[in-house]
Image: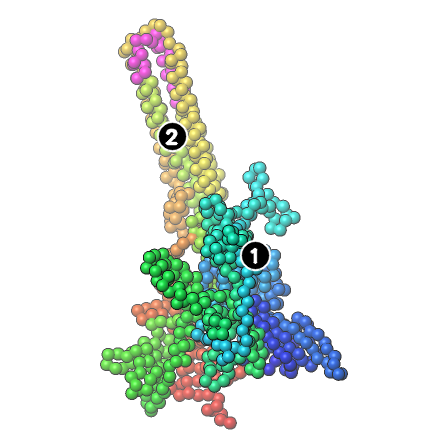
């Protein structure tokens, strides 16, 4: 049945149609065309359930009104409902090291679509700039290598959910084989080398142009607001070549007798790393160094006949094509389907592509493969690991496929005995069953094996208080305002990624108005907020003065050593000094004394200024560690230069100002001793100054270093307020104590490995792990599966359909339903 809705999504009518045809492509267009006698309008919507029982929504984009023999018909062209994403725009979005699900969530924030099932893809960085949401969605598929699936959820009131799933691979591999004259009416093979190349140039993002002063060149008239020059390449790490090559493909497809390379070019405008650019170019070359081969089949869906269940295929399925007449045996995927989506009255046209392997080559290549494997086993294993990682599918998808296959292949035997409840086995009792489900006394127990005594080993239990199990598998946990994607680890408590109490997007933990970037913890920057703590403010000056005077002490020791050298020079040349040396030594003593007095005064002044600076800095201190280090280093250099200058002046003065008169050794030694005493006195005065500075520094309780900040916070944590927007964390974060988040309805508490949920001040449930596994505990607990809720309360189990009011109840091992209570 094809239903027509107006632009307000109100049902208009059920359409009678002719010649209906749907065409779908893998990661491509999804169109619907039909004819009807009912008048339609642009923007109206059609809704129907296809042969698989899945809902489909299409938007009417074009229609043609036809007149023939006084009859009016409308030829209608529709596109799937994701086309409305062309009407939403992204101005500037720059994901950095972001998960696929977090980018998709931000992309769909203002649309009517929701994030569905998203597999765990490697994190990526790229730019989305002034594009429609639909265009950005195509780019996400390309960047992450994802495949899209759209799900529509409908109840009696109409469409209630529109989900977009991004999977590593949609479709199944059930071993379906299309055989000519069995279910293939015709087959056409197309080989194209239009885009084939054997060598590929790879270019990344353009290098930003900078001005003479080193600042980036900006031109607001250009898109992006900046100027960029030549694009980066990988020649520096690829033996000077800006391209990668496939010589095996060259020998097979190259130009002329010489088999020269066919060159191509690949642009990766978001790539800024040369190693990553080289890797991406090699991957692209693997795709374009082979001809594009497609098979167009006109097939009959024989799955609708008895005995052929499971023979049908869908978009993305892996299938095998066997045609002995044209010697074709290939494994490939369904990349396009043209069919009647509602009725099974016409043959379908299927296009197969992404050529994987010609199976007829297997026997020929076997010996060569065996030899290659034995000769280079380690290299072969590495390539297998890369291949396995490249096609790895979703964990939950594998689990679901496994259980679906087992469920389809496994029988069931039901035994109901008075007082024993309901027992469901995987084999008859006499056939040695190994699995069991037991419904008894308001409880359900599940066993997967038996004990040594032959009884079933029940390890999974459920009752009105909740479920207890060794293992709970799930892809997405969703309930109320909590969304937990267990595939990629993203977590949301709130309405969406803009309105939340807690949101973890895989790289950043968002807590209301606080963002903690755990991917950049190595740069804890900009903690320049006013901490309202004088001890922490004083620590900057303390660090400066302590380090400065420590370096001054080192320089004083250097002065002592240099004076000792001067004294030795006096002794060696004492016979050559003239009598005037005594006056000169007196002058030297005066110079040293004056220097000492001057330096002492400067120290006192410096100390006084520092004490005044301490008082001034009590209002606000915003000096960073790097600037402190620079300032102290500058002051040390000034002191060092002054000392070196004085020492040089002393040596020059003594060497250039002596007479022929000699002085006795005792007098020289006496004067030198006087100089030494003066210098010792100078060292003593400086030591006293250091003591005063040290006493002042001891009054400052914390330092600007990381340990100092931690110490200050530990001393008076109750007065420390750190603006959360200034905090970035990277790496593993350990929380000691209780972590609590709040919303309008209650709070969530994480403590000692247990996640507790409160409504007001009342505990309504918790999740924790013990020796038996993960425990979900709640007095009332619900599972939501689309249109169905499964509720566990104090009385039993209730299974109810949303909107219809219909429910099935199991109380005290008794099954209640509307059909039983109110038989027709």
User: What is the x, y in percent for residue 433?
Assistant: 31, 83
Residue drawn at x 46%, y 53% as measured from the top left: 247
Quick one: 524 or 600, which is closer to the camera?
524
Tag 1, which secondary structure?
Answer: strand
The question of residue 583 being in magenta is answered with yes
Residue at the bottom extreme, as displayed: 824
Above-or-below relation of 114 to 383: below
What segment carries the magenta color? Answer: 568-596
The N terminus appears in which quarter of the rendering? bottom right
User: What is the x, y in percent for residue 805?
Assistant: 52, 83
Label 1 neighbourhood size at 10 Å, few (<14), some (14-19), many (20+)?
Answer: many
Quick one: 598 or 553, which is closer to the camera?
553
**N-terminal-most mark, 2 or 1:** 1
User: What is the x, y in percent for residue 361?
Assistant: 43, 66
| Mark 1 lies on residue | 128
Picture quadrant of residue 648: top left
Residue drawn at x 27%, y 11% as measured from the top left: 666
Picture quadrant of residue 395: bottom left
| Mark 2 lies on residue | 552
Tag 2, which secondary structure?
Answer: helix
The colour scheme applied to this rendered structure is: rainbow
User: What is the x, y in percent for residue 194?
Assistant: 57, 60
């Amino acid at each position: 049945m094809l239903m027509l809705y107006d632009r307000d999504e109100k049902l208009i009518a059920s359409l009678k149609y002719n010649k209906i045809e749907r065409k779908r492509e893998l990661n491509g267009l999804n169109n619907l065309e039909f004819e009807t006698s009912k008048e339609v309008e642009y923007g109206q919507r059609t809704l129907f359930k296809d042969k698989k029982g899945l809902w489909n929504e299409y938007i009417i984009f074009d229609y043609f009104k036809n007149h023939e023999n006084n009859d009016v018909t409308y030829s209608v062209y529709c596109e799937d409902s994701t086309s409305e994403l062309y009407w939403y725009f992204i101005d500037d979005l720059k994901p950095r090291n972001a998960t696929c699900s977090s980018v998709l969530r931000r992309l769909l924030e203002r649309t009517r679509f929701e994030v569905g099932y998203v597999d765990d893809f490697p994190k990526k960085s790229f730019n989305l700039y002034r594009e429609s949401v639909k265009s950005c969605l195509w780019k996400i598929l390309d960047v992450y290598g994802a495949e899209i699936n759209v799900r529509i959820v409908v109840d009696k009131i109409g469409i209630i959910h529109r989900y977009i799933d991004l999977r590593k691979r949609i479709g199944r591999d059930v071993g379906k084989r299309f055989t000519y004259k069995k279910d293939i009416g015709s087959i056409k093979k197309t080989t194209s080398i239009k885009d084939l190349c054997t060598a590929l140039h790879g270019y990344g993002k353009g290098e930003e142009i900078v001005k003479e002063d080193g600042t980036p060149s900006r031109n607001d008239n250009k898109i992006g607001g900046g100027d960029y020059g030549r694009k980066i390449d990988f020649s520096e790490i690829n033996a000077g070549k800006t391209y990668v090559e496939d010589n095996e493909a060259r020998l097979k497809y190259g130009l002329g007798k010489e088999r020269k390379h066919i060159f191509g070019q690949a642009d990766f405008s978001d790539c800024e790393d040369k190693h990553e650019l080289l890797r991406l170019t090699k991957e692209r070359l693997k795709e374009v160094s082979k001809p594009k081969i497609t098979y167009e089949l006109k097939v009959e869906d024989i799955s609708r006949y008895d005995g052929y269940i499971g023979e049908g295929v869908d978009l993305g399925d892996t299938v095998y094509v066997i045609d002995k007449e044209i010697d074709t045996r290939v494994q490939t995927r369904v990349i396009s389907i043209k069919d009647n989506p509602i009725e099974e009255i016409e043959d379908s046209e299927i296009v197969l592509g992404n050529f994987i392997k010609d199976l007829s080559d297997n026997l020929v290549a076997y010996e060569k493969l065996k030899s290659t494997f034995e000769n280079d086993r380690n290299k072969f294993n590495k390539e297998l690991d890369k291949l396995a990682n490249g096609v790895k599918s979703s964990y939950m998808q594998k689990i679901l496929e496994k259980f679906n296959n087992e469920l389809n292949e496994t029988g069931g035997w039901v035994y109901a005995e008075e007082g024993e409840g309901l027992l469901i086995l995987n084999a008859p009792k006499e056939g040695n069953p190994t699995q069991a489900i037991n419904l008894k006394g308001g409880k359900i127990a599940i066993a997967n094996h038996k004990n040594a005594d032959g009884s079933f080993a029940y390890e999974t239990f459920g009752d009105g208080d909740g479920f207890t199990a060794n293992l709970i598998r799930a892809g997405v946990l969703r309930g109320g305002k909590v969304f937990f994607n267990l595939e990629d680890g993203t977590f949301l408590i709130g309405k969406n990624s803009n309105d939340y109490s807690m949101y973890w997007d895989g790289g950043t933990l968002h807590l209301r108005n606080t963002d903690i970037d755990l991917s950049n913890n190595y740069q804890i920057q900009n903690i320049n907020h006013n901490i309202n703590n004088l001890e922490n403010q004083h620590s900057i000056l303390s660090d400066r003065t302590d380090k400065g005077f420590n370096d001054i002490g080192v320089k004083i020791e250097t002065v002592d050593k240099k004076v000792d050298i001067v004294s030795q020079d006096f002794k060696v040349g004492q016979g050559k000094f003239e009598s005037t040396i005594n006056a000169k030594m007196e002058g030297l003593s005066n110079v040293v004394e004056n220097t000492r007095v001057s330096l002492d005064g400067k120290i006192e002044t410096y100390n006084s200024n520092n004490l005044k600076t301490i008082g001034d800095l009590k209002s606000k201190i915003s000096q960073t560690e790097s600037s402190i280090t620079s300032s102290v280093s500058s002051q040390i250099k000034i002191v060092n230069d002054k000392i070196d200058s004085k020492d040089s002046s002393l040596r020059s003065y003594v060497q250039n100002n002596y007479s022929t008169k000699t002085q006795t050794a005792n007098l020289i030694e006496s004067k030198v001793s006087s100089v030494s005493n003066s210098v010792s006195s100078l060292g003593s005065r400086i030591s006293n100054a250091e003591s005063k500075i040290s006493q002042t520094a001891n009054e400052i309780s914390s330092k600007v270093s990381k340990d100092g900040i931690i110490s200050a916070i530990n001393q008076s944590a109750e007065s420390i307020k750190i603006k959360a927007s200034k905090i970035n964390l990277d790496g593993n974060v350990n929380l000691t104590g209780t972590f609590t988040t709040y919303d309008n309805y209650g709070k969530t508490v994480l403590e000692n490995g247990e996640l507790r949920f409160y409504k007001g001040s009342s505990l309504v449930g918790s999740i924790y792990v013990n020796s038996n596994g993960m425990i979900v505990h709640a007095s009332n607990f619900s599972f939501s599966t689309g249109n169905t809720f499964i509720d566990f309360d104090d009385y039993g189990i209730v299974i109810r359909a949303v909107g219809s009011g219909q429910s099935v109840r199991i109380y005290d091992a008794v099954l209640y339903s509307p059909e039983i209570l109110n038989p027709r």
